[in-house]
Amino acid sequence: MPENSTPRHVFLTRGAGFLALWLGLMGPAMKDLPVGVVAAAAAVWTSTVLWPARGSLSFPGVLRFLVRFLPQSVAAGIDVARRAFAPVPSLQPGFVTYRTALPAGMARQACCAVMSLQPGKLPVAAEADGTLHIHCLDLREPVAEQLAADEAAFCETLQDGGRNG
């Protein structure tokens, strides 16, 4: 098998996962199944282009990340809502620079995408040297420390710890 081809088990695993997602979202109606199979096939093709088979995830790392991310996201969302609806919002917006250890590539981009899901912090630019420019709602918060913890948790989701980009 050539080095740049994707192993068959990757297609099958991803296909089963995307089809299961389709069935979970749309329900197991037989009339919708052909569309679900086509959508799953398109998702598999897209995922193999965007996330090659060598980009393996650590299942325990993903679980630990979700246990950390979901409550943190809810708490941050409540904090943003509290600030937004306060008579005098307690905000000190601005930009923070953060130097990531992740090399340029898919892992860094995925980490930035995950960071953007957290209310109150938004990566807006990335330099070639690993410097990220993050817009945050309150510069009084320990944003750099939070970003370091987020990055460390994200790296645990990757089999190689994100060392290969």
Image (cartoon, grey):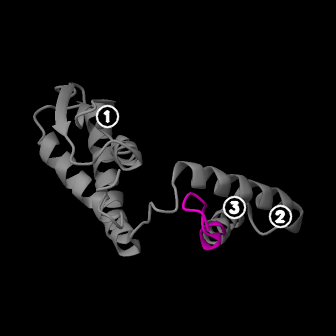
Instruction: Say which mark, if any, is on residue 123.
Output: 1
Instruction: Say which mark, if any, is on residue 33.
Output: 2
Amino acid type, mark 2: Leu
Q: Relative to 164, is 84 above or below?
A: above
**Nearer the observer, 78 or 65:** 65
Q: Of helix, strand and loop, which mostly describes the magenta segment?
A: loop
How crowded pointer 1 is (Cα within 10 Å; few <14, some 14-19, many 20+) is rated as many
Magenta region, residue range: 1-11
Q: Residue at x 83, y 67 (%)?
A: 29
* Label 2 to label 3: alpha-carbon separation: 9 Å
Q: Residue at x 74, y 65 (%)?
A: 27
| Residue 143 left/right relative to 114 | left
Q: Position of residue 156 (x, y in %)?
A: 29, 64
Of helix, strand and loop, which one carries label 3? helix
Q: Quadrant of the N terminus?
A: bottom right
Amino acid type, mark 3: Trp
Q: Residue at x 61, y 71 (%)?
A: 13
Residue bearing the label numbered 3? 22
Q: Residue at x 77, y 59 (%)?
A: 36
Of helix, strand and loop, which one carries label 2? helix
